[in-house]
Image: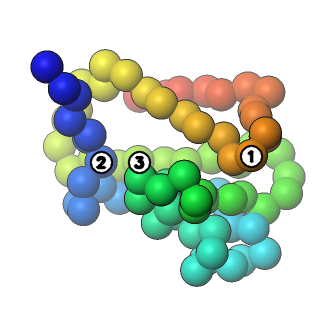
Amino acid sequence: MPLEPLVCARTATRVSSVLHRDVKQFGKQHLFDGSEETCWNSDQGTSQWVTLDFPQPVKVSQLHIQFQGGFSSRLCLLEG
């Protein structure tokens, strides 16, 4: 049975920053657009984050994080 995405139009999404404040090219709208050609890109610095506020309680069974072009995180913290 295929999994359905939990993120919907009513999911409130916040990010810590956007690279050079260029929201058009690197904004949060690219987090879930399904394209490997775009991405959210944070500004430099530590403790970059993404917050998702779902419109109703959800049960998460899987989380997939894909970093842009060879970059990765030293630490990922998931809070629920």
Counting residues from the N terminus, which is met first, the one under dot 2 or under dot 1? Answer: 2
Q: Is residue 72 left or right of residue 45?
A: left
Residue 61 bears which disc, if any?
none
In this rendering, the answer to whether 47 lies above or below 27 is above
Report the amino acid beneath label 2. Val
Q: Nearer the viewer, residue 53 or 75?
A: 75
Q: Nearer the viewer, residue 14 or 19?
A: 19
Q: Residues within 10 Å of mark 1 (few under 14, many from 20)?
A: few
In this rendering, the answer to whether 21 lies above or below 45 is below
Q: CA distance from mark 3 to mark 1?
A: 24 Å
Displayed quadrant of residue 13: bottom left
Counting residues from the N terminus, which is met first, the one under dot 2 or under dot 3? Answer: 2
Residue 13 appears in the rendering: no
Q: Is residue 64 left or right of residue 20?
A: left
In the rendered image, which quarter contains the N terminus?
Answer: top left
Whether tag 2 and tag 3 are in contact, CB under 8 A, the answer is yes
Residue at 35% across, 49% down = 53
Q: Is residue 24 left or right of residue 59?
A: right
| Residue under label 1 | 69
Dot 3 falls on a residue whose secondary structure is strand
Dot 2 falls on a residue whose secondary structure is loop
Q: CA distance from mark 2 to mark 3?
A: 8 Å
Residue 52 bears which disc, if any?
3
Residue at 37% across, 22% down = 62
Dot 1 falls on a residue whose secondary structure is loop
| Residue under label 2 | 7
- Determine the residue located farthest toward the right in the rendered image: 45
Report the amino acid beneath label 1. Gly
Position in image of residue 12 (x %, y %):
35, 59
Discs 3/1, front: 1
